[in-house]
């Protein structure tokens, strides 16, 4: 299919706009950038051969085969290269120390991974150099409800607030995780019922809070009336309304309430069939937005998952990404991603590595999924647009589309080829990595 | 061991590409197999009449992979039986005696294209037992046991230090090994002692030693030992070997390199590349199931990602390992006269997008991937 020219709102060839543009860029020091590329993998649409990506103010302004270039544009020649959106590892441990991933308390939704982020961790440069521009970092799997995850950009900022693309991306939970390699069956019962109990308590909490809010509103109305009357005739004066007892709000319950109101998806890590089914049952009962995490044995019950339209973040694709073979991975199958995606499950791929540095292998994970039956285009989508959609950041990242952030990668070959090297990485139009010639 | 479906039969395999390893890549060729051996490898894809044909015209065929150091089939569930923890010196122990050829991890390795392995004891004994070279499938003993005893394993790792028995220090570890080797050298054979006999063959008869050493100081200690006793040695692990690659290459010692793990720093992932470039003969190992990296090919693929020449990577997975383990007459390449141990993949063996579709050992199909 021929790709039509996709243009932004402004007619950039008008001289007046050009002048405006010139004054704007000189004022802010950000020049428009045009990448002329042999292959543009948009991910959202068909690839564009021999096209141009035009970047303005850190956003994709236009892309297609017939983009008209403004004057004073910085042209990057990538004629024999591939351009694709920045990669996303949705199961990353980057920027967090291993010991900081888990809280000893089991139900801790009020925790926020952002409080443990260390922007000074150097490994991020190696991850960035492989084309990863954003990661979702979630608490570990030792807590039943471990806390909230966040989507971070690898923009090099040392200020966590500036790295954050989305806070509270998900609330991370885990069921049926073994603490050792011994059987986890007893713990599993407890995991499931503890999470269920917390959600039931949250429902009660929400009702109480609603009631308290109603009572407070009623009090405020009566008080206003009383005060109004107070200024009137003395004779009609009524009894002064009594303030209801102050409602003690709980940060933990407030987060769980957001989950029940579907404002934050609950990301449940579950490996084995019985645990996945338990997670699905919880979602059936409470109606929250569920994201299945890891989903190691998902391929055995693909239809159950597909029927509920529950999205899945699959990882590790290969047990080579994790440290020791744990009980959870006993039935690990390299075709898990292929089977789930072919049955219609929305599937993202994560590295789920042992260490933050593992995120640099996200394309290897996608390649391995492709080797085991996933379509190559689906595998690429699973490390870009699909996780962006699941994590609620697809308006900003995940594909090359007009209006999205100019977070992109230039490669000297197809991204899934092992010999391919990343040449350049951009985040919001800024070059954040450039390969040295001898690297 | 996966049950052999049939007795080895005469077979012709037509392939899009045959990665012979020793004679380059043959496109549109054919491999003729008789009695479990490769009888011919040729460019002409015509097949003699009356032979069973496996047509892989759009696939790639390579020699079975060789995992040059692992502990497959040696664990009961996750409980490992690879270390003798009471005694420090156990050269008489043969690891093959603990091998379960039907273990899950053996099957898993087979599915990933590994056909031959070096079985080794763990790292907790300064002088551990004897390694063995086996195939992961075969009916008759002579078909799958290539070497019941392939050499003695030494460990210079910290793991070999214990608080409740000698040695408790690094220097003590080396002293203990020297003591044992000296003892074996000067021992008068008044009564038979198996432990001493094995070590005697190490110091007197070139019986191989596999020395596990990771760090620079451990490797230097190993090189010194080799020099002192004129040992026929192979290094296992050698993670930091790139720092002293010239010394290793100078003593002409081959290296069975640690698995490349997918969480290591770039600097560490480039080490094996520097060693190969420095002229050291490299084979890969998984140490499975001690690490999750049970897929040996991933090590080579990762090394290619970090700059290893693809031909060197392919050799490390096959012929280099066969030569280091002393079994290259039978395995390690697709050549006339060698065992028909073959892996069929749906693409270039060094691309992560390729996967194993079939594994053949001694001319018998031992694994065939099911369609998903």
Image (tube, rainbow, N blue to C red):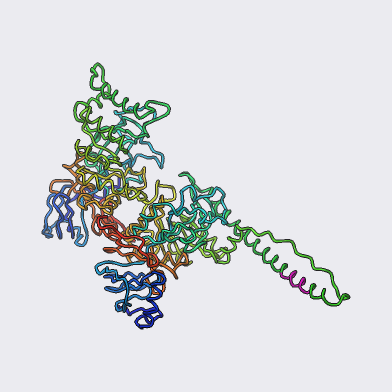
- Quick check: is A221 in the magenta stretch? yes
Which quadrant would residue B346 be assigned to in this image?
A: bottom left
Above or below residue A280? Residue A19 is below
Check the picture and name the quadrant holding the C terminus of chain A: bottom left
Residue A219: horizontal and vertical position, in percent? Answer: 75, 69
Residue A44: horizontal and vertical position, in percent? Answer: 37, 71
Residue B156: horizontal and vertical position, in percent? Answer: 32, 33
Above or below residue B181? Residue B273 is below
Residue A114 seen? yes
Which quadrant would residue B188 be assigned to in this image?
A: top left
Total of numbered circles in the picture?
Answer: 0
Q: Nearer the viewer, residue A153 or B60?
A: A153
Magenta residues?
A217-225
The residue positioned 18% from the left and 46% from the top of the image is B339
Above or below residue B321? Residue A172 is below
Q: Nearer the viewer, residue A267 or A15?
A: A15
- Quick check: is B252 in the magenta stretch? no
Residue B239: horizontal and vertical position, in percent? Answer: 30, 42
Which quadrant would residue A212 be assigned to in this image?
A: bottom right
The answer to whether residue A357 is left or right of residue B340 is: right
- Which secondary structure dominates the residues rendered in magenta? helix
Residue A299 seen? no
Check the picture and name the quadrant holding the N terminus of chain A: bottom left
């Amino acid at each position: 299919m021929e790709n039509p020219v996709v243009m932004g709102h402004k007619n950039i060839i008008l001289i007046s706009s050009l002048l405006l543009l010139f004054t704007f860029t000189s004022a802010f020091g950000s020049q428009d950038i045009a990448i002329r590329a042999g292959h543009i993998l948009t991910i959202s649409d068909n690839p564009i051969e021999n096209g141009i990506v035009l970047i303005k103010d850190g956003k994709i302004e236009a892309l297609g085969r017939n983009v008209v270039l403004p004057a004073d544009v910085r042209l990057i020649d990538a004629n024999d290269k591939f351009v694709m959106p920045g990669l996303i590892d949705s199961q990353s441990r980057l920027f967090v120390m291993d010991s900081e991933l888990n809280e000893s308390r089991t139900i801790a939704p009020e925790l926020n991974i952002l409080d443990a982020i260390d922007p000074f961790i150097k490994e991020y440069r190696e991850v960035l150099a492989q084309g990863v521009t954003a990661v979702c970092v979630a608490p570990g799997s030792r807590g039943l409800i471990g806390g909230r995850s966040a989507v971070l950009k690898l923009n090099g900022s040392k200020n966590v607030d500036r790295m954050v693309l989305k806070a509270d991306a998900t609330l991370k939970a885990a069921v049926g995780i073994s603490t050792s390699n011994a059987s986890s069956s007893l713990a599993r019962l407890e995991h499931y019922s503890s999470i269920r109990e917390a959600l039931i308590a949250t429902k009660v909490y929400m009702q109480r809070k609603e009631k308290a809010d109603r009572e407070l509103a009623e009090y405020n109305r009566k008080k206003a009336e009383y005060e109004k009357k107070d200024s009137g005739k003395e004779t009609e004066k009524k009894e002064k309304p009594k303030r209801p007892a102050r409602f003690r709000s709980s940060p933990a319950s407030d987060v769980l309430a957001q989950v029940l109101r579907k404002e934050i998806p609950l990301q449940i890590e579950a490996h084995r069939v019985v645990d996945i089914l338990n997670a699905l049952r919880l979602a059936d009962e409470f109606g929250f937005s569920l994201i299945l995490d890891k989903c190691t044995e998902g391929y055995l019950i693909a239809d159950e998952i597909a029927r509920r339209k529950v999205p899945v973040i699959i990882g590790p694709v290969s047990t080579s990404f994790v440290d020791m073979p744990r009980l959870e991975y006993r039935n690990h199958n390299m075709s898990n991603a292929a089977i789930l995606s072919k049955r219609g499950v929305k599937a993202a791929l994560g590295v789920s590595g042992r260490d933050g540095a593992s995120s640099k292998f996200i394309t290897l994970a996608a390649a391995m999924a492709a080797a085991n039956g996933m379509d190559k285009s689906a595998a690429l989508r699973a490390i870009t647009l699909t996780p962006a959609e699941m994590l609620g950041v697809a308006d900003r990242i995940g594909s090359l589309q007009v209006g999205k952030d100019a977070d992109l990668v230039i490669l000297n070959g197809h991204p899934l080829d092992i010999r391919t090297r990343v040449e350049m990485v951009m985040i919001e139009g800024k070059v954040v990595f450039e390969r040295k010639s001898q690297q | 061991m996966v049950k052999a479906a049939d007795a080895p039969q005469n077979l012709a395999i037509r392939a899009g590409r045959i990665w012979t390893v020793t004679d380059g890549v043959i496109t549109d060729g054919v491999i003729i197999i008789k009695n479990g051996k490769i009888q011919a490898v040729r460019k002409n894809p015509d097949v003699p009449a009356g032979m069973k044909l496996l047509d892989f015209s759009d696939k790639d065929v390579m020699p079975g992979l060789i995992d040059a150091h692992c502990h497959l089939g040696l664990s009961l569930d996750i409980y490992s039986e690879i270390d003798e923890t009471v005694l420090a010196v156990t050269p008489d122990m043969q690891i093959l005696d603990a091998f379960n050829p039907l273990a899950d991890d053996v099957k898993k390795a087979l599915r990933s294209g590994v056909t031959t392995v070096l079985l080794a004891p763990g790292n907790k004994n300064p002088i551990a037992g004897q390694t063995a070279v086996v195939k992961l499938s075969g009916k008759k003993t002579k078909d799958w046991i290539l070497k019941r005893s392939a050499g003695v394993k030494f460990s210079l790792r910290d793991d070999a230090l214990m608080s409740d028995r000698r040695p408790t220090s690094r220097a003590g570890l080396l002293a203990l090994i020297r003591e044992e080797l000296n003892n074996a050298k000067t021992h008068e054979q008044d009564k038979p002692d198996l432990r001493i006999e094995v070590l005697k063959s190490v110091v007197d008869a070139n019986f191989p030693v596999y020395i596990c050493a990771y760090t620079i100081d451990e490797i230097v200690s190993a090189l010194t030992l080799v020099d002192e006793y004129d040992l026929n040695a192979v290094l296992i692990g050698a993670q930091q070997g790139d720092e002293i690659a010239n010394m290793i290459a100078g003593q002409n010692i081959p290296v069975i390199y640690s698995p490349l793990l997918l969480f290591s720093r770039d600097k560490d992932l480039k080490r094996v590349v520097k060693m190969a470039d420095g002229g050291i003969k490299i084979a890969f190992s998984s140490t499975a199931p001690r690490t999750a990296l049970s897929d040996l090919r991933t090590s080579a693929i990762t090394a290619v990602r970090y700059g290893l020449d693809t031909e060197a990577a392919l050799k490390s997975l096959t012929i280099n390992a066969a030569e280091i383990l002393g079994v290259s007459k039978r395995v390690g390449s697709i050549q006339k006269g060698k065992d028909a141990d073959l892996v069929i993949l749906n693409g270039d063996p060094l691309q992560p997008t390729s996967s194993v579709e079939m594994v053949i050992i001694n001319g018998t199909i031992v694994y065939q991937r099911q369609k998903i």
